[in-house]
Image (spheres, rainbow, N blue to C red):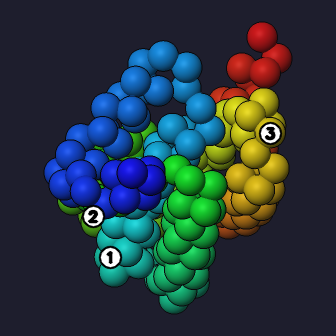
Amino acid sequence: MTENKATQERTPQKRLQEEQEHKEHVHHTKINAAAIADHLLGNMHTLHVKLHQYHWYVKGANFFTLHEKFEELYNENEKWFDKLAERLITSGHKPASTTVEFEKYSMLSEDAVNKYAKAEDMVENIIEDFRSTRDLTIRAIRLAQDEGDDALEDTLIAFKNDLDKNIWMLQAFIGKEALEDDDALDEDED
C-alpha cells in the first residue's frame, strides 16, 4: 500500500490527531521554523481583529489618516497571512488554520475596551504588536537558515522588512525615531 493510499484511508479526525501530536512534540522538544510560523500566523490573526477594530473606532483630528492607514495595514497583514501559510504548505508543513489554533499560538492580545483608546494609543499598541511579531520573525528566520529552508527564510525576511517599514512609519506618525523605545535593541546590548 502506498503512503498516499494509507493517508487517504485514515479518517480526517485521525489525521488531525497525528498532526496535533506532531506539533506538540516539536513545540516541547526542538522548536523549528514552522512551529514559530504558527505563532506568527496567530499574531496575524490577532492583528486582523485589532486593525479592523482600530479602523472602525479611531476618532479625533487624525481620523481620516488613521482610518485609511489601519485599512492599508490590515490588507497588508492579510496578504502576509496567506503568503506565509501557503509557503508552509508548499514546504510540506501543516500550518494552523482555525480560530482556536490561532488563539492558542498568538503572542498578542486584543480587548474590546481598546475601541475607546485614544488614536495615539492605538498607534503605539500596533507598534508594539509589530515589534513583538518582528522579534518572533527574526527567530523564525534564524531557524529557517539553520534548517536550510531558503524559500521560507526568504518569505520571512520579506515579511520582516515590511514590519520594519511599518514600525518606522508609525513611529514617525507619533513623532519618534524609527528605533526609539525599541526594547529589542536594549536586549541586544546586554
Q: Which residue is mark 2?
A: 116
Q: Looking at the figure, which quarter contains the C terminus?
A: top right
Q: Which residue in the rendered view is the most extreme toward the front? A: 1
Q: Amino acid at mark 2?
A: Tyr
In depth, the one of 114 and 157 nearer the eye is 157
In depth, the one of 51 and 42 nearer the eye is 42
Q: Residue at x 24, y 52 (%)?
A: 10
Q: Amino acid at mark 1?
A: Tyr
Residue 133: % across, % down: 57, 46
Q: Are marks 2 and 1 in contact (CB under 8 Å)?
A: yes
Mark linked to residue 57? 1
Spatial distance from mark 1 to mark 3, Cα to Cα? 44 Å
Q: Is residue 167 left or right of residue 41?
A: right
Q: Secondary structure at mark 1?
A: helix
Q: Are marks 1 and 3 in contact (CB under 8 Å)?
A: no
Q: Amino acid at mark 3?
A: Gly
Spatial distance from mark 2 to mark 1, Cα to Cα? 7 Å
Residue 99: % across, % down: 26, 58
Q: Residue at x 42, y 19 (%)?
A: 28
Q: Secondary structure at mark 3?
A: loop
> Nearer the observer, disc 3 or disc 2?
3
Marks counted in the figure total 3
Q: Residue at x 34, y 42 (%)?
A: 19
In depth, the one of 115 and 28 nearer the eye is 28
Residue 160 visible? The answer is no
Mark linked to residue 148? 3
